[in-house]
Image (tube, rainbow, N blue to C red):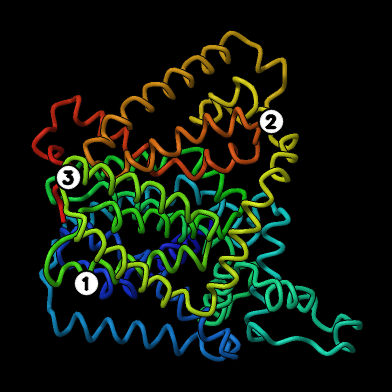
Amino acid sequence: MHFELVALAYLIFIAFGFIGSGIADGLGRHYPATRRWLLSPVAGVSSMVLLTTLLSKIGFATKHFGPFLVGAALAANVVYWLIKRPAIDWKKAALWNGALFVALLLVGWPLVLAGYNWVSFGNIDMTTYLLGANHFYEYSFYQLPSLDDLLREVDPSWDYSFYYSIGEVRSASQLILALVMSVTSLTAVQCYMLLILAFHLTVIATAAALICSRQTRERIALVALLVIGSSANLALGTFNQLLPQDLGISALTASSVVLLNRPPSGSALYLQSGLGGIFLGTLLVAYPEMLPFALIPFLIYIVITLVKRAAQARQWLRFVGLTGAWALICANAALPGALHLLIWTFGSSTSFADVGTLFPYYMTPFGLALGWGLAPMGISDAAASTWQMQMRILLGGGLFLIALVLTIRDALRLEAAAVVAATMLLLFIELFFGKSAFGLFKLAMYAQPFVLGALTIAVARMLGARPALESAGAEG
């Protein structure tokens, strides 16, 4: 048994949380205390992503600056909290940490059994990110090998130097993996599953922050955390070792927390735009393919507030301008690569459709069961044709229709999670008729924090939790 490694994965998550606690508390001071606490891990990850990327592009190898960067970030937050001297509700902290640790065990139990030998599927994605992390640990972003070293294959990671230096391919997760290597002195293989579990927890905590828009919503947010932490499709991305995806979902969810909010007045507007710029900048650097899932719901949210006269156009223009400016500043040197990848992704949509043969179930009614985690992937045709499986397919279809109606209704009530969820559910229909099986496979994982979070709110409203849920768009 290797319980110490589960504790180490949780410690990495806590370290990110402490690093980001000053950012979340300072820039999100107009948010409820629990929401700020839940945003701390993603704020810590975001700050490390942006700074590590910048230092690597300037010309430093991660092994040289990693311990100093993390040490300085931790020290800065120690000073911040010593000055502020906050009152801590230890019972509440124990409750939330207990729920997060349960979510960790639900996904990370193989780590307890296998220790460092747990490599899950050991797929090509993991191999690619390991080589990238090894490269950034030893070398800077734009450092290229000599022709002699390349031909003699002195270092296998050199094969990826052109992939990043010239291709400007997204590399944030590889850089963070190299950063963890530099602090822990572990190898990339040893760090990999520890880090992806920490990212998995970051997704769940940030999703709970999206729900916890007011202090009266803490119980609903806690239930949502447990529901999202039990999601089979969200766990699938972690088991498939999609390190950038977990990082990207965290940044997308954090961006939604800030953007899908009526712009406040006074100094809070500038603070909120700064926080939004950090999260949007991280999304651009870490997983730009998800940017449309941040911007389209944002535009929908703005239109709804203007139609309902819940906000003024002048407020939105100021907030959009400031947030956009901060996002560009945060992305800085990584912006050309992010834009290139976005353009390539849109231009390659037909190519993605061609890989539909890899995910055939999503182009059949069976995908309705898969999308809700009601059936395992790779099931035989005989098992899929049983009456029990047919009932699961019908249940999946019914849940989809119910979720679509409820999320559209709550989106019109300016419920942040519902705006993103409704957008994604409508996109499911478009992708299905567009025969994009790969897109459906990915969207089933992307949508979990938003759809399950929005449904948790809808169920709570049905059960009579109105005082905590009314006027969803009034915060800010």
- Name the residue beneath numbered marker 1: 270
Closest to the camera, between mark 3 and mark 2, is: 3
Q: Nearer the viewer, residue 120 or 447?
A: 447
**In the picture shown, does residue 389 fall above or below 212?**
above
Q: Which image quadrant: the N terminus?
A: bottom right
- Name the residue beneath numbered marker 2: 378
- Name the residue beneath numbered marker 3: 217
Alpha carbon distance from label 2 to label 1: 49 Å
In percent of width and height, residue 133 lies at 64, 73
From the viewer's perspective, tell me whether residue 112 is left or right of residue 20: right
Name the amino acid type tagged 2.
Gly
Q: How many neighbours does mark 3 have within 10 angstroms: few (below 14), some (14-19), or many (20 or more)?
A: many
Name the amino acid type tagged 1.
Tyr
| Secondary structure type for disc 1 | helix
N-term-proximal mark, 2 vs 1: 1
N-term-proximal mark, 3 vs 2: 3
At x 23%, y 53%, the residue is 261
**In the picture shown, does residue 184 fall above or below 149?**
above
Name the amino acid type tagged 3.
Arg
The picture quadrant where one finds residue 388 is top right
Q: Which image quadrant: the C terminus?
A: bottom left
Q: How many neighbours does mark 1 have within 10 angstroms: few (below 14), some (14-19), or many (20 or more)?
A: some
The picture quadrant where one finds residue 265 is bottom left
N-term-proximal mark, 3 vs 1: 3
From the viewer's perspective, tell me whether residue 88 is left or right of residue 350: left
**In the picture shown, does residue 202 fall above or below 107?**
below
In percent of width and height, residue 19 lies at 34, 75
From the viewer's perspective, tell me whether residue 179 is left or right of residue 89: right
Alpha carbon distance from label 3 to label 1: 25 Å
At x 56%, y 89%, the residue is 58
Whether label 3 touches label 2, CB < 8 Å: no
